[in-house]
Amino acid sequence: MVVEILAVGTELLMGQIANTNAQYITSRLQEIGFKVYFHSVVGDNPERLKTSLKLALSRSDVVITTGGLGPTKDDLTKETIAEYFGLKMVVHQESADKIRNFFARLGRDITLNNLKQAEMPEGCIILENKAGTAPGCIVSGDEGSVILLPGPPSEMKPMFDSSVMPWLQKDSESVIISRYVKVFGIGESKLEDMILDIIEGQSNPTVAPYVKDGVVTVRVTAMCNEEPECFEIMEPVIKEIILRTGTAVFSTTGQSMEEVVVELLKANSMKIATAESCTGGLLASRLIDVAGASKVFEQGYITYSDSSKVSELGVDEKTIDMFGAVSEEVALEMARGLFKKAKVGVAVSLTGIAGPGGGTTEKPVGLVYIAFKTTDKEWVVKLNLWGDRTRIRLMSVLTALNEVRKYLIGNY
């Protein structure tokens, strides 16, 4: 089945917000084997929306729209699509009651334009919005089906997962399952070269590597009659990828690097503490984002200035004067001081130059030192990273987490 995504909203055309909804929907559709050939964006204009919808339906079986379901006058997606299919707008009482109850719980007066969200194309399938007030719907006609979803990702994603995915799969005789092999420390091109024969020889399951946020992921997807069969035919492929990439694989279950590290810390009954300069608390934040991190995360310091490295972590001023704040020596003293102060199993410190300014010939932007102190050893990793400030900070944090992971699995 071919699906097209049509985002509605002038704010998207003006670049005020990014169209992350299309990215999410496409990734989820690929998991179930549906094809997406086009993404379209149209402003809040009924005539242009009709034109875009006609084109989309001419080349796709299903069109998914996002946006334009709100209470204001420019939210006209439902009304325009109803008109396109020759349908009347009628009040869906259950949705109207839910909107009234929502405002009553907030202690706020409801206005007529809020109840506009409960007006739906006659005969449509209602999609409940469990995260907001605007319900979605599915409208079908001779030209195909249109699925209308709200624009805010926090509302769109749960509606798509709980209602749209089951609807799309209802007539499918096959089950499509994907597993994700996550790799860090091997670049995308090198990884592809390492498993090129697997990629070129793929049929079922299919194998596709891609990179996102510093992590290379190999998606392995199988289509079968039943789930157990899918897992059975994927397992040898996944094992072969792991055999070739070794400990660079940190997850085959969809876990993030920080989730893996927190799980390993728990398994080892060990706590961690962090001291950050160039990353400004990003490492601590990534760890704390994981549910249950309170059991393993002891404390974190943001020692951005030279004086704070001295006062909070006990770094010797002479070390900074002699080697500079961005140096192996200072990173190691930061980790040692943190280890002594926090009394944890693993202490991690980072110091570097994230840019865009501050670099020199001897110490360019992207130079980062990460030091580790544990009960049985200490070591320092030197990085020469490229990219903007955001990438340098991200890759520094991922490297720090990966080093801790390798230590905890006995890879040192």
Image: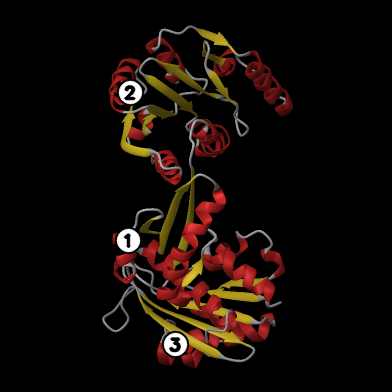
Q: Is residue 366 left or right of residue 140?
A: left
Task: Count residues near mark 2 (Cα–Cα under 10 Å), then give few for <14, some for 14-19, many for 20+.
Answer: some
Task: Please provide percent x and percent y for residue 388.
Answer: 33, 63
Real-space CA distance between mark 2 and mark 1, rounded to the nearest whole angstrom? 33 Å
Can the viewer see residue 21? yes
Q: Nearer the viewer, residue 89 or 206?
A: 206
User: Tag 2: residue type?
Assistant: Leu
Q: Which residue is mark 1?
A: 199
Q: Earlier in the sequence, mark 2 or mark 1?
A: 2
- Disc 3 marks which amino acid? Glu
Could you say whether the residue bearing mark 2 is in a helix, strand or loop?
Answer: helix
Residue that badge 3 annotates? 328
Relative to 270, is 141 above or below? above
Residue drawn 31% across the image and 32% down it: 40
Q: Residue at x 73, y 27 (%)?
A: 105
Badge number at residue 257: none
User: Disc 2 designates what residue?
Assistant: 57
* Mark 1 nearby-residue class (10 Å; few <14, some 14–19, many ≥20): some
Query: 204 or 270, which lies in front?
Result: 204
Tell me what residue is drawn at x 41 percent, y 60 percent: 218
Q: Position of residue 125 (x, y in %)?
A: 54, 20
* Direction from residue 47 to residue 286 in the image, left or right: right
Q: Residues within 10 Å of mark 3 (few under 14, many from 20)?
A: many
What amino acid is found at the position of numbered circle 1 in the picture?
Answer: Ile
* Relative image position of residue 20 (x, y in whole percent): 42, 42
User: Which percent across, then down, holds residue 246?
Assistant: 45, 76
